[in-house]
Structure formats: C-alpha cells, structure tokens
Image: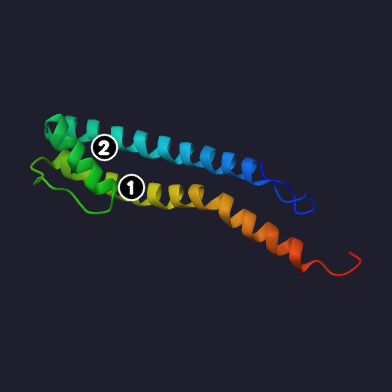
Amino acid sequence: MYEHKSQPLLDRKVFLRRVARNALVAGAIVAGSLAMGVFGYRVTEGLGWVDALLNASMILGGMGPVNVLHSTAGKFFASFYALYAGIVFLMTTGILATPFLHRFLHRFHLEVRAPGG
C-alpha cells in the first residue's frame, strides 16, 4: 500500500490523494458508527431520531449521553457503544495520521542515508 523505503518520496499530488482516500475511509467508519448508535438508541430507549442522533453523536465525540437512560437494554447499549466509540476514535486517528507519519519517516530515512549507501 505504501512505498518501500528504497523508493523515492511520492510527489505532492499522489500524497494528497492518499490523504483524501484515508479521510474517506475514516469518514465512512464514523458515519457507520453514528448510524449504529442512532439505531441502537432508537431500539433500546425508544428515542426520537433527533434525540438518538444527539446521544450517539455525543458518545461518539467523547462527551457522554444527553438523555437519561431508563431501560436496562439502553444502559447496556450505551456502555458498549461508549467502549466501541473509544476504539473508533483511536482507529480513525490512526487512519488519518498514517499518511503523514509515513511521509515523515520516509523523508527522515531518505535524509539519514550513509554516504555511498
């Protein structure tokens, strides 16, 4: 997927395409996770669409639920969704940062080569 250390550094246009592709993947993961949260709150707590979206967005964003949860199923869902949201946060951060970190390390490796090597 990424170029080997012996290959030259990608030009800016190809690099930006790589960043855009990773941003699309991260966005799709977040959108799917948000949809899962909205449907989970609709099913377990019977919240309306807007309230379910608000609660799912707040948990996915790391803020916590807005509405008081009344059902045991809703509390279990919120607990597992919060844990899942933490993993999604780490995963999307990694997906977004990977092209930049790879380019930095690739450039660093190109500059540190020993003479004659």
Number of dots carrying numbers: 2
| Disc number for residue 37 | 2
Distance from disc 1 to disc 2, alpha carbons, whole Å, reads 9 Å
Left or right of residue 73, residue 37 in this image:
right
Q: Nearer the viewer, residue 116 or 5?
A: 116
**Residue tagged by mark 1?**
85
Q: Residues within 10 Å of mark 1 (few under 14, many from 20)?
A: many
Counting residues from the start of the chain, the first of labels 1 and 2 encountered is 2
Q: Quadrant of the N terminus?
A: top right
Asked if disc 1 and disc 2 are in contact, CB closer than 8 Å, the reply is yes
Residue 19: name its quadrant: top right
Residue shown at the point (34%, 46%) measured from the top left:
84
**Disc 2 element:** helix
| Percent coordinates x, y for residue 51 in the rendering | 13, 37
Residue shown at the point (45%, 41%) measured from the top left:
26
Q: Is residue 42 above or below residue 92?
A: above
